[in-house]
Amino acid sequence: MYKTLKISIGVFLLAAATAVAILAYQASQLTDVSAQENNNQQSEENKDDSYTYKAQPGDSYTEIARKAVQTYGIDNNVNLTQAGIVFAETNLTKDAGSPELEVGQEVKISKDAVKKYAEEAGKLSDSQQKAWNYYVAFVNFDTNAVGQE
């Protein structure tokens, strides 16, 4: 009977150790899935932090910045003058270092930066508006095809 009891306890301990190992493995899988879900959620949130476009033949960073400013205005019901749009796009382009784009390149422009310059554009004085208005004649404000696939 002592030998049977000893074997039974050994089998019980082996079964218990196996169960603990299985539970630990399952818990680690849940943690990995949870971490992946958090990463996916953060990735989705980050997508909302910027306007994203894909450069098309002939697109410039300035045109994409213009489209971001116009999109911001539409999305947030903000009316900017054309001079204000030129002001905002120029500052966004300058901040980005006036990069040259490759066809197919993904371009992200921070919504916070667009908001900042759109708000500043709305506060331009009459003389500043007049100065920026000079450039309006040289700008095509139709950005429908800019940054689109």
Image (spheres, rainbow, N blue to C red):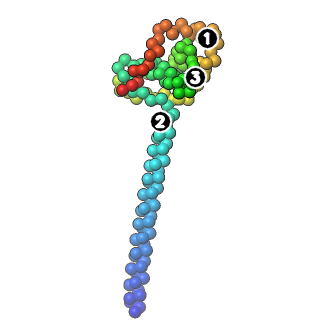
SS at circle 3: loop
Alpha carbons under labels 1 and 3: distance apart: 19 Å
Tag 1–tag 2 contact (CB < 8 Å): no
Q: Position of residue 73 (x, y in %)?
A: 54, 23
**Few, some or many C-alpha atoms within 10 Å of disc 3 (few <14, some 14-19, many ≥20)?**
some
Residue ID for mark 1: 128
**Few, some or many C-alpha atoms within 10 Å of disc 1 (few <14, some 14-19, many ≥20)?**
some
Hey, what amino acid is under mark 1?
Gln
N-terminal of the two: label 1 or label 3? 3
Q: Quadrant of residue 6?
A: bottom left
Residue nearest the viewer, comparing 51 with 107: 51
Alpha carbons under labels 3 and 2: distance apart: 22 Å
Q: Is residue 106 visible?
A: yes
The residue shown at (50%, 24%) is: 71
N-terminal of the two: label 3 or label 2? 2
Q: Is residue 93 visible?
A: no
The residue shown at (42%, 27%) is: 53
Residue ID for mark 3: 78
N-terminal of the two: label 1 or label 2? 2
Query: Where is the N terminus found, in terms of image quarters?
Result: bottom left
* Residue that extends furthest to the bottom in the rendered view of this protein: 1
